[in-house]
Amino acid sequence: MEQYIIKNQDSFNSKDIFECGQCFRWNKQNDNSYIGVISSGVIKVEEKNSEIIFTGETNGNFKDVVREYFDLDTNYNEFKTKLSNVDEYLKESINFGSGIRILNQDLWECIISFIISANNNIPRIKKIIERLSKVYGKKVLFQNEEYYLFPTPEELSKASVQDLRNLGLGFRDKRVFNTTQMILNNEFNIENFKKINNTETMREELLKLDGVGPKVADCILLFGAKRSDVFPIDVWVRRVMNDLYIHNENEEKVSKKELIKLAEEKFLGIQGIAQQYLFYWKRESGKSA
């Protein structure tokens, strides 16, 4: 068991980070702490007064794992200052979710998780991923409780389409199976993908994977590849953008192309960061213009 404590960290709030829709392996505990399973182990996050206490069992140097995963070396105040100057809506959404940080999640896990997320809700996504991990992932013990790491491509390749169907994946079963096989067979090389510097090229590569459409690709790019110049669009994002800026009586008629163009113009190259503030604000507070 290892521990790392930071004090007076700007832009860090556990609820904002873990409830803003970017991750699926974190769960709130009775003492208001959060426990999560990441690719290298299990971490507990507690906030007490001005301290943030990280306790965990991980591979590698624990401090380095924490700082990398929670993006602690990025100055989010710069993002917030830049976006707050766009308009009062952005300023209010940032004040609401001021503790959001974009986690550095494992790319492989991110790909499969967001394929599972298609036409799904967060509680159900979390249950499916937990079942998948329990059946095919490695068991680890943390504070006398059992947790399961997300399975590697080799581990998940042991699952047939029917096995995945039995775990509740529904129509996503074939998609997860096919994408796992593509990655295992090196038709999609994760390490080579990480070396690509152009966002559009990365998106084109992701779209070759079964079950990865434009929205899922943008989620993977933002949460698994740290590309903040993408703007994932779901029902909440379309709604808040329409409410605040477009004002179409039928929000479903607002095209993704229009939303993406507007985001590029307004959010100054960090539209993925803006998306998280707006998404969280709209979903949690129901705020509209």
Image (cartoon, rainbow, N blue to C red):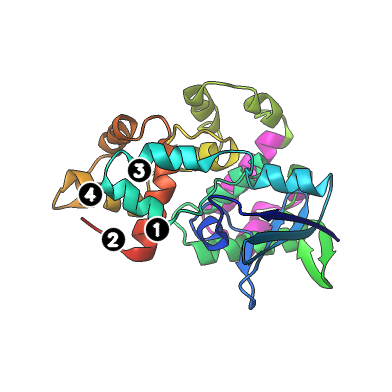
Q: Give the residue at mark 4.
A: 244
Is residue 175 rendered magenta in the image? yes
Q: Position of residue 246 (x, y in %)?
A: 18, 44
Which three-letter amino acid code belongs to the residue tagged 4? Leu
Which three-letter amino acid code belongs to the residue tagged 2? Lys
Q: Give residue 186's quadrant in the image.
A: top right
| Residue at disc 4, secondary structure | helix
**Is 84 situated left or right of 104 in this image?**
left
- Asked whether residue 212 appears in the rendered view, the answer is no
Which of the two labelled residues, at mark 2 and mark 3, occupies the earlier sequence position?
3
Q: Position of residue 275 (x, y in %)?
A: 40, 45
| Residue at disc 2, secondary structure | loop
Q: Position of residue 219 (x, y in %)?
A: 49, 43
Quarter that holds the C terminus: bottom left
- What separation in Å lies between label 1 and label 3 (alpha carbons)? 12 Å
Which of the two labelled residues, at mark 4 and mark 1, occupies the earlier sequence position?
1
Highlighted range, magenta: 155-183
**Is 48 situated left or right of 13 in this image?**
right
Instruction: Sort mark 2 into few (<14), some (14-19) or many (20+) by Cα contacts within 10 Å.
Output: some
- Residue depicted at 74% across the width and 63% down the height: 134
Residue 67 in the image: above or below residue 267: below
Q: Give the residue at mark 2.
A: 287
Q: Give the residue at mark 3.
A: 84
| Residue at disc 1, secondary structure | helix
- Residue depicted at 50% across the width and 58% down the height: 16
Instruction: Sort mark 4 into few (<14), some (14-19) or many (20+) by Cα contacts within 10 Å.
Output: few
